[in-house]
Amino acid sequence: MKTLKDRVIVITGASSGIGEAMAKVYAAQGAKVVLGARSVQKLQLLTGEIRAQGGQAAYCGVDVTQPEECRELIETAVREFGRLDVLICNAGISMRAIFDDVELDVLHRLMDVNFWGTVNCCKYALPYLQRTKGSIVGISSVAGLHGLPGRTGYSASKYAMTGFLETLRIENLKKGLHVMIACPGFTASNVRFSALTADGSQQGETPRDESKMMTAEQVARIVGRGIVRRKRLCLMEAEGRATHFVKKFAPGFLDRMFYLVMSREPDSPLK
Ligand code: NDP
């Protein structure tokens, strides 16, 4: 696969942020994109926008915590475009509370969307992707490379995704399946506004300066290049590369750096 042109790509969490950007960027590159999320109206608008610009797109309302809805998303892609080349498990939610304070239900919700949502979509996409020797992409995070304080459930869900996807890669070693784990750092999006607090309510605001982050479009372009090159791990900016490197040699130093950075956030839950 030299480009994404004519590739059939399912993207979960396509109604906002990184997922929305991937849909626009890949459709502009000639891919046939199939969009999934719960906000059907937003998907409908985005599909219309892509088609109006000459691109090819379809959508399917999906809550990724529901296996049958994930099956329908994958079947939509095959029905509309006849095959499946890439599944991008991007749908995700975040949190902000230390473990002392957080209600257990919040951690279950994080695992349900981020981890089980990935597993559910992979289950139904796998036979089609084995046929095309296609790609599965998990949108993890720098928090999936090293524990991020105040985000126990988030980091745990991303580590779980990694364990699942790495095993899937090895099981499919002789079948030509490509599996890539992408780890964006802080990226301007809705994720911090919708992040769950200790009692499970949405945060409603961001504690960080969103204008100083990578844009969702930049992340989309880097992930797209990673798919074409069939990379295993897709790191994007200095923070991600430094985390990956320093963890190998000085994990204790990395602990202190992560604590420092996160404790400096306004209203940080770290005491
Ligand atoms: P957004 O909040 O902007 O987008 C999240 C997307 O996930 C939305 O489209 C939302 O759609 C969808 N979603 C949430 N819950 C469900 C569900 N149960 N079923 C289906 N779709 C769901 O955040 P981002 O774009 O930032 O996040 C995308 C991914 O990138 C996530 O996995 C996140 O962890 C990861 N990431 C983000 C970083 C950042 O700083 N922004 C950094 C590192 C990783 P809807 O509500 O319509 O269902």
Image (cartoon, rainbow, N blue to C red):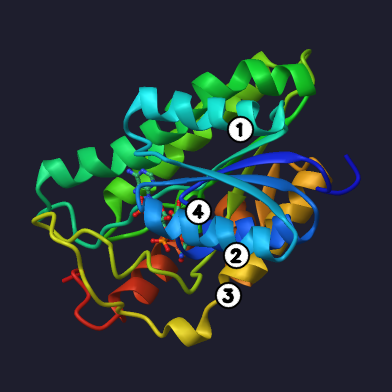
Asked whether residue 236 appears in the rendered view, the answer is no
Identity of the amino acid at label 4? Ala
State left or right for residue 231 relative to residue 211. Answer: right
Residue in the foreground of this view, choosing between 204 and 41: 41
Residue drawn at point x = 30 percent, y = 56 percent: 151
Residue drawn at point x = 51 percent, y = 85 percent: 212
Q: Which numbered disc covers residue 214? A: 3
User: Are circles 3 and 4 on residues that touch, CB within 8 Å?
Assistant: no
Please rate how many residues cluster around mark 4, counting C-alpha atoms within 10 Å: few if below 14, some from 14 to 19, many from 20.
many
Up-down relation of residue 101 to residue 90 (above or below): below
Q: Which mark's residue is nearer the viewer, 4 or 2? A: 2
Q: Secondary structure at mark 3?
A: loop
Distance of mark 4 from mark 2, alpha carbons? 13 Å
Q: Give percent across and percent down for residue 123.
A: 50, 20
Q: Is mark 4 within 8 Å of ligand 1?
A: yes
> Which residue matches tag 1?
77
Q: Which mark's residue is nearer the viewer, 2 or 3? A: 2
Identity of the amino acid at label 1? Ala
Identity of the amino acid at label 3? Met
User: Are circles 2 and 3 on residues that touch, CB within 8 Å?
Assistant: no
Q: Secondary structure at mark 2?
A: helix
Distance of mark 4 from mark 1, alpha carbons? 14 Å
State left or right for residue 166 relative to residue 260. Answer: right
Identity of the amino acid at label 2? Glu
> Which residue matches tag 2?
49
Q: Earlier in the sequence, mark 4 or mark 2?
A: 4
Distance of mark 3 from mark 1, alpha carbons? 30 Å
Asked whether residue 157 appears in the rendered view, the answer is yes
> Which residue matches tag 4?
14
Q: How many marks?
A: 4
Please rate how many residues cluster around mark 3, counting C-alpha atoms within 10 Å: few if below 14, some from 14 to 19, many from 20.
some
